Image: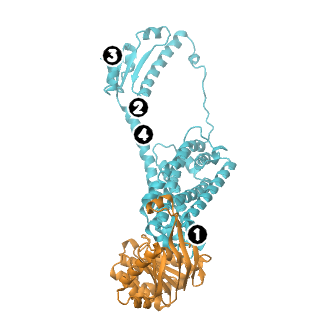
Chain colours: A orange, B cyan
């Protein structure tokens, strides 16, 4: 379970940044007083336009960034007081296939397993399972630089899931990927759901939300402007497409936030 | 500790597969340095030989016939159709090497036991010319002195009132220490720094640029342990580069032509276990210092190119103290012992010569260790800042 409690991320702006952003404000809220809960066995989706604060929020859940105020509990552990315990419970995956070009898939997965302190037997079993599921065996000894984007994304998934995390964080996991590679990710999210894991993923692709999502949060300019089940979102937008409904919510709330 | 070893193991595997690192840390110092020593020495020797064999075109003006005969050999082409002005012009146009103009009273003065004067016009850029003509004139001088000794009927010792009997009590090791001990640290300090440079950029800015750092920060390992693993890896590569440089130089010196056996024996004598341990004890904190410093700098860069532009000028900061150590009169003392890089360069000279003071040596090792710790903690402070590690 993930409990986001009144979380704010505020950045102090330098004079140069103030000039670039054409503002007199000395600070900016990337995330402003956001609260929600993600429950195990359900897919929680964070939707929002570019620059809304989705990545910042996910990075705070993944302990990469510290909240300026508020708290986040991951399976009961606080990101502020027990970041290391939180990290042992999470798997983090982004759309960009960030891997070490000179290593092989086998070496990368072993590296992350060692960093998670997995014992040899557990690692071998888990690796076999993931490599079978994702068809990595055939290229497991090739260097990453020799692999296609799809192959790399499979390795990224294996790396993030090797320690069998109970909470999985996907930051725009299909962004910039071809249909087949994106499908692998969607399958992985479905499987995680079946296994009862807590899943949170950010996206701006409405079809993915429609396909996978159980609970939905919409963020705009760092503010949470919608938080409900997908069912309720669909019923609220009965006469519109989901995309139209999303745009309308963002527009209405943007005017309100500015006002 | 397990986490640190895991990071070191991965980073070493990754780094050793990087061509740039292999070139800067292994190939350059191990192959280029000995090749450079061999080729520069051979080139210098062949140039000197060539200059020594070259026939010099000399214009003799007002030369007495008896003296002219002295210059008549295969080394000189004697020309007598020049005056001093046309001779100087010809030298400037490189059609003539030198003009020797004898004073009209030359022979008279010599016969009256006075000094005979001659003007020598030449270009100082013409290597060995002055030495070769001087040798000729020195022969002439000796002849005149011998004649005067006979005329005066005195002992030739009257013209050599003092004879210096040189007894060099410096051991061959000490002589070599002062000779190669100067430029050896210049090379290994430079290569140690360059050896640290590429892994630092690759392991820190590279992770940031590729975005791999983001995933790495979500594992249950502290940033301190991750950074320590990276710094140790960078230091190992820097240290290897320094050791390869030393090895390369020793190999290069062994293959140099015309090296006396005594010299080669002394080199083997220098490479004792004691020397290696003493040098290693200084090089280890030095490479950690470089690794810490470079990490702290490159973590600020967003791309490989930006990191390169930040650290490349630092090479000069490293070279300058090493160059100062090459200057005559710069010795290891209680002032220079505190100056980083200069102290290690001077201490190496003293270690090779076998004249290092143990107090000064310990001070250098401790001061370098403190510097390494300061650089590492500075690096950790930078690495802990959210804005620094994320692109």
- Residue with the mark numbered 1: B225
Q: Residues within 10 Å of mark 4 (few under 14, many from 20)?
A: few
> Alpha-carbon distance for marks 3 and 2?
24 Å
Tag 2–tag 1 contact (CB < 8 Å): no
- Residue with the mark numbered 3: B83
Q: Residues within 10 Å of mark 3 (few under 14, many from 20)?
A: some
Say whether mark 3 and mark 4 are on the same chain.
yes
- Name the spot of residue A220 as percent of width and height, x first: 45, 76
* Quarter of the image where the N terminus of chain B is located: bottom right
Tag 4–tag 1 contact (CB < 8 Å): no
Marks 2 and 1, the one that precedes in the sequence? 2
Tag 3–tag 1 contact (CB < 8 Å): no
> Which structural element holds mark 2?
loop
Marks 4 and 3, the one that precedes in the sequence? 4
- Residue with the mark numbered 4: B45
In the picture, the disc for residue B95 is none
> Alpha-carbon distance for marks 2 and 1?
60 Å
- Name the spot of residue B38 as percent of width and height, x first: 44, 47
- Residue with the mark numbered 2: B127
**Residue B218 seen in the figure:** no
> Which structural element holds mark 1?
helix
Using the image as rendered, state which of residue B250 and residue B188 is in the foreground: B188
In front: label 4 or label 2: 2
Marks 3 and 1, the one that precedes in the sequence? 3
Tag 3–tag 2 contact (CB < 8 Å): no
């Amino acid at each position: 379970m993930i409990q986001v409690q009144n979380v704010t991320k505020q950045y102090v702006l330098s004079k140069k940044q103030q000039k670039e952003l054409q503002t007199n404000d000395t600070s900016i809220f990337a995330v402003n007083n956001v609260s929600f809960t993600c429950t195990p066995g359900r897919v929680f989706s964070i939707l929002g336009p570019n620059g809304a604060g989705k990545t910042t929020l996910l990075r705070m859940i993944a302990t990469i960034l510290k909240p300026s105020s508020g708290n986040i509990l991951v399976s009961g552990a606080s990101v502020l007081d027990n970041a290391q315990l939180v990290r042992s419970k999470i798997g983090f995956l982004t759309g960009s296939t960030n891997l070490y070009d000179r290593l092989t898939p086998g070496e990368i997965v072993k590296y992350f397993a060692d960093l998670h302190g997995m014992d040899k037997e557990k690692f071998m079993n888990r690796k076999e399972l993931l490599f079978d599921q994702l068809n990595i065996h055939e290229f497991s000894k090739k260097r990453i630089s020799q692999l296609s984007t799809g192959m790399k994304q499979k390795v990224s998934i294996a790396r993030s899931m090797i320690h069998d995390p109970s909470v999985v964080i996907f930051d725009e996991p299909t962004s910039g990927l071809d249909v087949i590679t994106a499908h692998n990710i969607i399958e992985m999210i479905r499987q995680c759901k079946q296994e009862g894991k807590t899943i949170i993923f950010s996206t701006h692709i409405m079809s993915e939300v429609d396909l996978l999502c159980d609970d939905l949060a919409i963020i705009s300019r760092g503010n949470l402007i919608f938080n409900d089940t997908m069912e309720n979102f669909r019923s609220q937008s009965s006469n519109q497409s989901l995309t139209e409904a999303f745009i309308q919510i963002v527009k209405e709330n943007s005017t309100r936030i500015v006002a | 500790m397990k986490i640190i070893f895991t990071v070191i193991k991965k980073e070493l595997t990754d780094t050793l597969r990087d061509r740039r690192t292999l070139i800067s840390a292994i190939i350059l110092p191990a192959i280029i340095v000995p090749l450079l020593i061999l080729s520069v020495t051979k080139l210098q020797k062949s140039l000197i030989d060539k200059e020594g064999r070259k026939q010099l075109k000399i214009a003799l003006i007002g030369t007495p016939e008896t003296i002219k005969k002295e210059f008549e050999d295969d080394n000189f082409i004697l020309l007598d159709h020049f005056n001093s002005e046309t001779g100087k012009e010809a030298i400037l146009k490189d059609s003539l090497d030198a003009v020797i103009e004898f004073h009209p009273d030359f022979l008279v003065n010599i016969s009256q036991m006075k000094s005979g004067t001659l003007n020598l016009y030449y270009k100082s850029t013409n290597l060995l010319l002055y030495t070769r003509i001087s040798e000729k004139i020195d022969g002439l001088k000796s002849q005149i002195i011998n004649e005067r000794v006979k005329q005066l009927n005195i002992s030739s010792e009257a013209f050599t009132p003092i004879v210096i009997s040189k007894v060099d009590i410096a051991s061959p090791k000490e002589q070599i220490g002062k000779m190669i001990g100067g430029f050896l640290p210049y090379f290994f300090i430079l290569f140690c720094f360059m050896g640290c440079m590429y892994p630092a950029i690759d392991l820190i800015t590279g992770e940031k640029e590729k975005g791999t750092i983001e995933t790495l920060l979500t594992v249950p390992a502290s940033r301190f342990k991750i950074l320590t693993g990276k710094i140790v890896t960078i230091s190992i590569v820097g240290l290897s580069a320094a050791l390869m440089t030393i090895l390369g130089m020793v190999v290069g010196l062994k293959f140099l032509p015309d090296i006396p056996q005594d010299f080669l024996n002394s080199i083997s004598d220098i490479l004792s276990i004691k020397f290696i341990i003493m040098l290693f004890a200084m090089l280890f904190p030095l490479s950690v210092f470089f690794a810490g410093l470079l990490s702290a700098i490159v973590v600020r860069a967003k791309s490989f190119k930006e990191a390169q532009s930040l650290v490349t000028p630092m090479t000069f900061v490293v070279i300058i103290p090493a160059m100062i150590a090459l200057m005559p009169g710069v010795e290891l003392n209680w002032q220079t012992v505190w100056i980083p890089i200069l102290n290690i360069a001077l201490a190496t000279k003293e270690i090779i010569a076998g004249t290092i003071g143990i107090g000064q040596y310990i001070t250098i090792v401790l001061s370098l260790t403190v510097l390494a710790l300061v650089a590492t903690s500075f690096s950790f402070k930078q690495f802990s800042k959210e804005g620094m590690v994320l692109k």
